[in-house]
Amino acid sequence: MNWKRAALTTALVGGPVIALLAYGMTRDPREIPSPLPGHLAPVFTGAVFAPGNDDGLRLAVGDTVRLAEHRGRVVVVNFWASWCLACRTEHQALSTVARNYAPQGVKFFGMLYNDETPNGVNWIEQMGGQAYPALSDPGARTAIDYGLYGVPETFVVDQRGFVAKKFVGPVEAGEMSKLLDSLLLTTGAPNASTNAVAPVPKSLPSADTKR
Amino acid sequence: MMVALTAARRAMLALVFAVAPLLQAAAQSDPAPSAAPQTVLVPPAGVDSVLDARVKTVASRLRCPVCQGESIQDSPAELSAQMRLLVREQLATGRTESQVFDYFVQKYGQWILLEPRAEGINLLVYWLPILFLVLGSVGLMMAVKKWTRPATIAD
Amino acid sequence: MTRILGLAAIWVALAMAVGGIVLSIVGLTRKKPALVQSAFQTIYVTFALLSLAVGAMIYALVTHDFSVGYVAQVGSRSTPTFYTVISLWGALEGSILFWGWVLAMYSAVVVWSNRHRPGGLVPWSGATLQLICLFFFILLVGPANPWHLVSPTPLDGPGPNPLLQNHILMGVHPPLLYLGYVGMSVPFSFAIGALLAGEIHSADWIVLTRRWTLSAWALLSMAIIAGMWWSYEVLGWGGYWAWDPVENASFMPWLTATAFLHSVMVQERRGMLKLWNVNLIVSTFLLTILGTFLTRSGIISSVHAFTTGTIGYYFLGFIAVCLVASLILVAGNSEGLRSEGHLDAAASRETVFLFNNLFLTGFTFVVVLGTLFPLVAEAFKGVKVTVGAPFFNKMTIPICVALLFLMGVGPALPWKVATQQQLKKMFVLPSVVTAVIIVLSLVFGMRDPYAIGAFAFAGFALTSNVREYVVGAMARVRAHGEVFPVALVRLVAANRRRYGGYLAHMGIIMVAAAITASSSFRYEREATLKPGQIMPIKGDLSVRLKQLWGRDEPQREVVGADVEILNGMNVIGMLDPRMNFYKSQDQPVPTPAVRSRPSGDVYINLMAYTPDGQSATLRVIVEPFVPWIWFGGLVVALGAMISSWPTSRREPKSVPYVTTRAVPVGVPEPAFGNAGISTATPSSLPPHTS
């Protein structure tokens, strides 16, 4: 029984394997980091199907919202669906924060994901109304443009048009408020990332042209 | 009692767009009770079938974000159908396959590719097995040679 | 009551396992045979206890005893009885219980059928098996406890996962899988037992190990094919293999076991590759545990992933213990296992087996690396990557083609050495067939080199293997004057191991050719139809939507489409793809409808429909030759069964009870000629019968 060889082999072979598997236990394979934070938020155009009742925008059903028009303001885009259970949890929080920050020019928009607008309207009614407008996203073009994995997902876009943060899952009012506060404080450039990802060339069709 | 599928209509609209051309239109038909045309009319063959093949190739290498490891080509999920349509449009407007992949990687990260790009650390997963087999074959051939030589005094 | 009974049975079994291990160790080290016998008794009792526990669980499931945690999790009053019974293995806790039972059964059968064998092999192997059992019993009273009390008792449950209620194959695939998968614990326990008993150098334990490996391998082969069939019929994408981690988990040990079944023959004949074979056996078992760990720990996302929790940590600990123990034992004894390699010629069956092992091991390496690579990339670069089907297909198809080639060369080459003449004789016909197939493939418009190569070498291998049968039978006809069919039967009976193996080869060839054909010639169409409309598919084939319907079933609501299959204007079949809406799920579960014929399948999936029933979107896939995959699996199993059919030859001499010193290196191993292996004869001579 060659103990030296046994020990050596165990260390060389067993060590790395067990280390790798142990490392794997600390990771969650379903948590996929988004490449969007730190980059320009994809522009979108959405049609309003349910106007917000307290956001100062005075939009009507059928109006078009363009992200580009809100450059200079902090924008929060929340993707949701009427069939999404977790979306119910965060709705109250979102509406409250939207109402609180509307005076400071923060714009909230709900983007409907893979659902019918009548269902969306009913859902909003059931939930007791919504402070901010709900937009439709036919063909999930905007959702794909934002790299959506599911709902709810919420993107916060800063004044320069960069994605500051992506929330996966139901948003907490406290967390959201803190982030909005920090963004509103900075007047200059927030953390523009220097990640070397090539921006989408201008000659290519952007996601919202084809209907 | 039928149960409505949310967004079923939208899915179907998207799918009609993506429908492949017929090989031949069936001219005659059974006398059918309904007055609807017997054969489905779809975009004619030609450019579309080439585009279809390209869409299929690209879609087979993109991962469905809401499924477990399926490609958007195989997955029945609505998001997959929508992504396939987007792929189709992008290819139809002249983007190359590589550009389409780049687009999705920008949105979803490297994870969206079903096969890791052969760069950086990913080269390991491609080259290690190749090295294993090549070196193994060479080593084995040398070993067989050694083992088949006539027995010498040392053996 | 049932709950208490089941839980108590597990606790007692746990105590028995601990007791048995202690008894074995003391009995072996202090040379007290009585203690060893008692240890054996505990193994039998453990099996009885686990049977009791499983029986109690099935009873609880069928009587809808929702006070039992597992029943509350997977039971439902509206689930049909068949699916209620098979929900035993449908979720984590039940599957661990089932694993424990299969393992206890194997332990009992292994020990009982070898109880008279003197020596330390059986007691040490039994103790090893009990150690593995102990781990699973700890799981069953810990993180995977199916017996915990649910209070207050619910009135009903959510039922099993809807995907597991759609097809009867769910009653076939898991039992086969567990029998095969868990069965790989037996060869492992023999290897460890032999190492601990100092019998690793004798030829005994390898014979025993080979037989058990062969039967577990046959079951695992059938299980993998059944799994492919289930996934094909249920999941709706028209495919049968996606390189999902759980599929890889079952495949990796199969590959190393296949390698072992070949290289063991080299060990038996030449005394070579002893260390290699031990490594293969140990790796096979470790891969089964790794596979289970991957699907139950949540470190890799998979279609099959059971709910995760702390159980991953237990499995990690178990892998660590098994890995470290195996490495220490094998590496520590490796010097004694090395033997001089000596071959008569490069052109011999031995050489083919060596390359077969290289390719199979390479194949395993690709699958292991690909499955684990996302972790590696994340560990070193912090980026999440996907290693999916395109990667695995790209990397493994060439290896498969090479293996098909070897499958044709191996059976034709004799052991030891082949003369030029022999080579010419044996390979002329197969080579001609290969060339013809290549030409035909090109003529039919095939351009993918790997697909053509796969067909070509499949033909090569098939010809070669069939030729072995024909030549052997013809030799008997000449020598004994038998009629051909009789000669064939007697040929196989006299050389079961060899001809069973060739039959298994033919099964694999069938599977490989069918997979190649169905992916090369697959044809897909999708369209939205109104009732009465026809969608042409290919040639004369078309489908017509008759109507959409809906109905309520106790456990679900079903929406289906009646679709007629037309050849020209004749209705040749009818299919009803469906969407199933379960109360517990947001999204519906589609069930495709498949019409199978030997020439291929018509596969229809209902993709979408309008609530008014006025249109349905159907995806129709034509899958040529797919039923040959399932049939090929049966042939493989049949071949393995023939190969392992016991002969009446006597067992080799056993080692005396007191453990002996290792056989010194350099002593030539006896040429091992029993169990149906014929000693090297050129194929043209009649095989001897005895």
Image: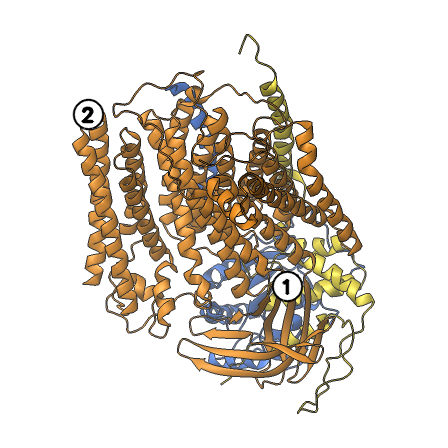
Which mark, by number, is residue C677?
A: none
Identify the residue position indicated by label 1 in the image. Answer: C599
Pick out the residue farthest to the front: C481
The answer to which quarter of the image holds residue C115 is top left
Q: In the figure, what tint was chain A given?
A: blue
In the image, residue C298 lies at what x, y percent? 45, 51
| Viewer-side label of 1, 2 | 1
Q: In the figure, what tint was chain B given?
A: yellow
Identify the residue position indicated by label 2 in the image. Answer: C30
Q: Are marks 1 and 2 on the same chain?
A: yes
- Depth check: C564 or C253 in front? C564
Amino acid type, callout 1: Ser
Chain letter for the part of the structure drawn in orange: C
Q: Residue at x 42, y 53 (%)?
A: C176
Amino acid type, callout 2: Arg
Report crowding for label 1: few under 14, some 14 to 19, many 20 or more residues within 10 A (C-alpha): few
In the image, residue C79 lies at what x, y percent? 37, 72
